[in-house]
Image (cartoon, rainbow, N blue to C red):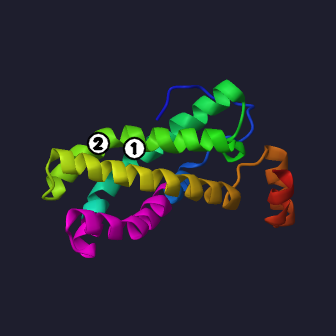
Amino acid sequence: MSNMPVPANAPRTLRTPRERLAQVVAYEVLGVAIVSPGLAWYAGLSVDESAMALVVLSLVAMTWTGAYNEWCDRLEWRIRGQRASARSHTCRWLHACGLELSLTLFTWPMLVAVTDLGWREALTADIGLTVAYVCYGYAFHLAFDWWRPLVSDDAAMAMNARGSRNEVATAR
């Protein structure tokens, strides 16, 4: 994903591949469920057709989202020495906007291909999807980081020794 090296003695700052996959899949599945009705209304599609169009876009988005999140997490650790789960609200908004704006480069042509929308209408739809997903992305990642925080190695060992998730909350 990224060629930025992470020191061997660094605390756990990145999600495991399994956690990253769970994060991306949950993000996309919930996003399709939440956003499909709006796209259906705008594009004159049934909700089923809208959901299928979003699934196609979602496959592209899942690939890009995983790579983008990995790159951002590594960059943030390298520049600020900070874990993604400790990200400020400003950084969360920048992260969500950056993800959705960069994703538009892939999704705009895809919208033209999978709907009857022309380029201008597809761009308008993509902008609407971008605004919806930026808001959704902010809320989703805030909730996901609360649910699955990245903790220091010491806190993780204490949590594992006690078998309690409550230790994570105090370690944040």
Q: Which residue is mark 2?
A: 106
- Kindly tell me whether residue 76 is visible in this rendering: yes
Task: Give the answer, above or below, for where 50 lies relative to 11.
Answer: below
Secondary element at image label 2: helix
Front one among 170 and 39: 39
- Based on the picture, tell me whether residue 30 belongs to the magenta stretch: yes
91 relative to 65 in the view: left or right? right
| Residue type, label 2 | Phe
Report the magenta stretch's main SS.
Answer: helix
Which quadrant of the structure image shows residue 18? bottom right
99 relative to 153 in the view: left or right? left
Front one among 165 and 102: 102
- Based on the picture, tell me whether residue 132 belongs to the magenta stretch: no
Residue name at image x 39 percent, y 43 percent: 64
Q: Which residue is mark 1?
A: 64
Q: How far from the left and from the top, in percent, is residue 81?
A: 72, 30
Pointers 2 and 1 in contact (C-beta within 8 Å): yes
